[in-house]
Image: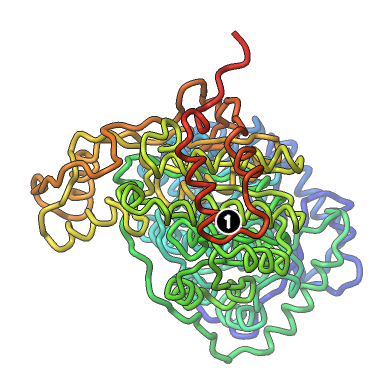
């Protein structure tokens, strides 16, 4: 039902006498939403005290009160819409009774099932029948008291009113609210602008955690179009990045005026829901209240839709591994990357693109993307929205050119460098060792030295599980890169960490990408050897692996690897991709034979190495003594102004010297 200009703006407070008195100062104000806490519905006496506090607040006669249910019950258990136990029943009924007693036309409850990161990563999920039971009980309890039941959309990261970090498998996407209203038609909506914006940012940065491959249908305008017609309440505040929730009006990234104008046309109650530093004071909230009043005068203007871009491939690689991606250490990563400068070599490649997309969610000051692939750089820039492009610098640069690398890193002034640029194909390394020397070793040396010269705080170097045994020429270049990283850390006392990546599903040029294309084309899958045993991670896992590596570097860890990679034969992987890609029956396999440099099986850690307990989801330190003999040998022999051929010869000799790259023996018995 359209209300036109009849909408009512509201402030927000807990039902405490001092908060209510402060909110009513400086008016006149037309209404206030009560945010109930567990203590306010602990028993009938607590309920009576809330009602008495509201009645004695001194509000004008025409004042409007609305109510919002707690996020936890008196026992401390969080409200979960998939858990209707006796305490939940009592809590729902008391919350609805508060709403009735204060004359609130609505009651809002969050559509969520809060889970810890470990619970969420385990893929526990929710019981839909239990959710329906909860929501029907909630709707009936409200309607029996003449109150309209509303469910509210939630942000991707739930920090709750009581503290802690949680996630919910439902309630963030506007589709969730529509789906549950279809099943329980008595439900209406409370739409939160900040929550919607944060969910979109998360979908763009790390959407696989919610089963999303695009954020294109999650712009704020789409939320308004889908939810406003059935919304009774809108919570209005600004947002920033992944965690900036409930910010003062106009202080974040949202253009709220046209959104508020549209909401005012259909939504009866617009709440200025600002997270004040001091809950006892409300200057930002009251400023937002006035901003809502001003914006409402713009009613009738069209909302601009966000431009659509080419969609990403929607294939679900998590389904192939039958495991959910790691939950990032969001608070720690925000502290590390927010407002900082980041540089990524090989940043236009598959993993680099996933990493930069992920890091953009934390709103770094700048991300510099260095790559020698002009087409990939251009494609990456064209795929980004305006907010991302403004925070990025795309640089055409070859890490083999020491002078260019030094100038670009000095100009970018990064706090953190991710060195991903490398040649990675095992068979090509056997055929063209000089190219691997130039990129993987000379290039890495250039990056590490330039980072030292520029005073870069942290450098993460991408290694591989193939470095563990170094059975191939490619594996030996990567082991050398690990030793170069440790050598740089010891030389400058700085944070330098090598992280062993694995076979990343869907990365450009990988076997998994080829299998998917062949599946979609309905042609035989070309497999080297079905019995080859490999470790596999998703692209999203690879992004968090690199980012979490920077957290480990802060703690002095010099070598790390995935903590929970899935082990499958290449044949098993091919069959899984075939099935998930829509193939019928068993895939037709064409065997090609093992290529030069390849082995039948791989390991995460080699002799004299141990994988420690994970520090963050998806990553664990490798406990090992990393020798520096090879880097020291090269450093002594590199000519100061040698030719390219002379420099390459030194590196090649180091690669060939017996024992120079061998892992150090343990120093204790």
Q: How is the image coloured?
A: rainbow
Question: Can you see residue 149?
Answer: no
What residue is disc 1 on?
155
Across and down, in percent, residue 389 comes to 58, 75
Query: Does residue 514 appear to the left or right of 474 in the view shown?
Result: left
Corner quadrant of residue 575:
top left
Across and down, in percent, residue 498 comes to 57, 41
Q: Residue furthest top?
A: 669
**Viewer-proximal residue among 286 and 644:** 644
Name the residue at 66% across, 46% down: 160
**Viewer-proximal residue among 493 and 68:** 493
Name the residue at 58% across, 91% down: 301
Name the residue at 74% across, 38% down: 46
Say what secondary structure mark 1 lies in.
loop
Name the residue at 40% across, 44% down: 474
Corner quadrant of residue 641:
bottom right
């Amino acid at each position: 039902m359209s209300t036109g200009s009849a909408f009512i703006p509201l402030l927000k407070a807990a039902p405490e006498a001092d908060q209510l008195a402060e909110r009513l100062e400086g008016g006149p104000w037309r209404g206030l939403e009560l945010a109930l806490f567990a203590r306010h519905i602990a028993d009938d006496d607590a309920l009576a005290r809330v009602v008495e506090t509201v009645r004695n607040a001194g509000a004008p006669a025409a004042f409007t009160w609305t109510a919002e249910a707690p996020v936890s019950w008196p026992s401390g258990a969080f409200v979960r819409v998939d858990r209707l136990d006796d305490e939940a029943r009592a809590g729902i009924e008391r919350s609805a009774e508060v709403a009735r007693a204060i004359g609130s036309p609505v009651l809002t409850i969050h559509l969520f099932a809060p889970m810890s990161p470990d619970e969420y990563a385990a893929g526990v999920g929710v019981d839909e029948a239990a959710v329906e039971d909860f929501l029907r009980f909630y709707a009936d309890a409200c309607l029996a008291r003449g109150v309209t039941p509303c469910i509210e959309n939630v942000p991707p990261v739930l920090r709750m009113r009581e503290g802690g970090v949680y996630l919910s498998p439902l309630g963030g996407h506007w589709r969730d609210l529509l789906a549950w209203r279809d099943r329980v038609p008595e439900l209406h909506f409370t739409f939160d602008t900040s929550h919607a914006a944060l969910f979109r940012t998360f979908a763009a940065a790390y959407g696989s955690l919610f089963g999303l491959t695009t954020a294109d249908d999650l712009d704020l305008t789409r939320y308004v179009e889908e939810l406003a017609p059935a919304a009774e309440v809108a919570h209005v505040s600004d947002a920033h990045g992944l965690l900036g929730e409930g910010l003062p009006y106009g202080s974040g990234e949202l253009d709220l005026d046209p959104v508020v104008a549209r909401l005012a046309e259909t939504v009866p109650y617009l709440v200025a829901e600002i997270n004040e530093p001091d809950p006892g004071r409300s200057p930002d909230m009251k400023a937002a209240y006035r901003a809502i009043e001003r914006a409402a005068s713009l009613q009738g203007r069209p909302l601009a839709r966000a431009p659509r871009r080419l969609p990403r491939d929607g294939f679900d690689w998590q389904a192939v591994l039958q495991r959910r991606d790691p939950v990032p250490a969001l608070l720690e990563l925000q502290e590390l990357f927010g407002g900082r400068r980041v540089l990524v070599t090989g940043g236009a490649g598959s993993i680099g693109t996933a990493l930069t997309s992920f890091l953009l969610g934390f709103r770094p000051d700048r991300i510099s993307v260095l790559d020698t692939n002009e087409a990939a750089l251009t494609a990456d820039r064209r795929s980004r929205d305006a907010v991302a492009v403004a925070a990025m610098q795309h640089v055409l640069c070859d890490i083999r050119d020491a002078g260019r690398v030094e100038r670009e890193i000095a100009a970018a002034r990064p706090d953190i460098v991710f060195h991903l640029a490398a040649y990675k194909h095992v068979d090509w390394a056997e055929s063209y060792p000089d190219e691997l020397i130039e990129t993987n070793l000379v290039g890495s040396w250039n990056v590490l030295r330039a980072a030292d010269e520029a005073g870069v705080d942290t450098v993460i170097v991408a290694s591989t599980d193939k470095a563990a045994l170094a059975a191939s020429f490619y594996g030996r270049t990567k082991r050398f890169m690990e030793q170069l990283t440790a050598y740089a850390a010891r030389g400058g006392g700085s944070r330098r960490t090598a992280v062993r990546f694995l076979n990343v599903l869907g990365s450009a040029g990988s076997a998994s990408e080829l299998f998917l294309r062949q599946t979609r084309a309905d042609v035989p899958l070309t497999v080297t050897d079905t019995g080859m045993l490999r470790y596999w991670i998703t692209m999203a896992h690879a992004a968090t692996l690199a980012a979490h590596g920077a957290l480990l570097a802060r703690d002095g860890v010099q070598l790390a690897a995935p903590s929970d990679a899935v082990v499958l034969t290449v044949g098993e992987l091919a069959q899984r991709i075939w099935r998930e890609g829509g193939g019928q029956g068993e895939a037709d396999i064409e065997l090609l034979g093992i290529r030069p440099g390849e082995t039948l099986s791989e390991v995460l850690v080699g002799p004299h190495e141990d994988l420690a307990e994970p520090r963050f989801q998806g990553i664990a330190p490798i406990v090992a003594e990393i020798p520096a003999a090879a880097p020291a040998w090269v450093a002594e022999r590199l000519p100061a102004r040698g030719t390219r051929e002379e420099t390459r010869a030194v590196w090649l000799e180091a690669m060939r010297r017996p024992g120079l790259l061998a892992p150090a023996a343990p120093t204790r018995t």
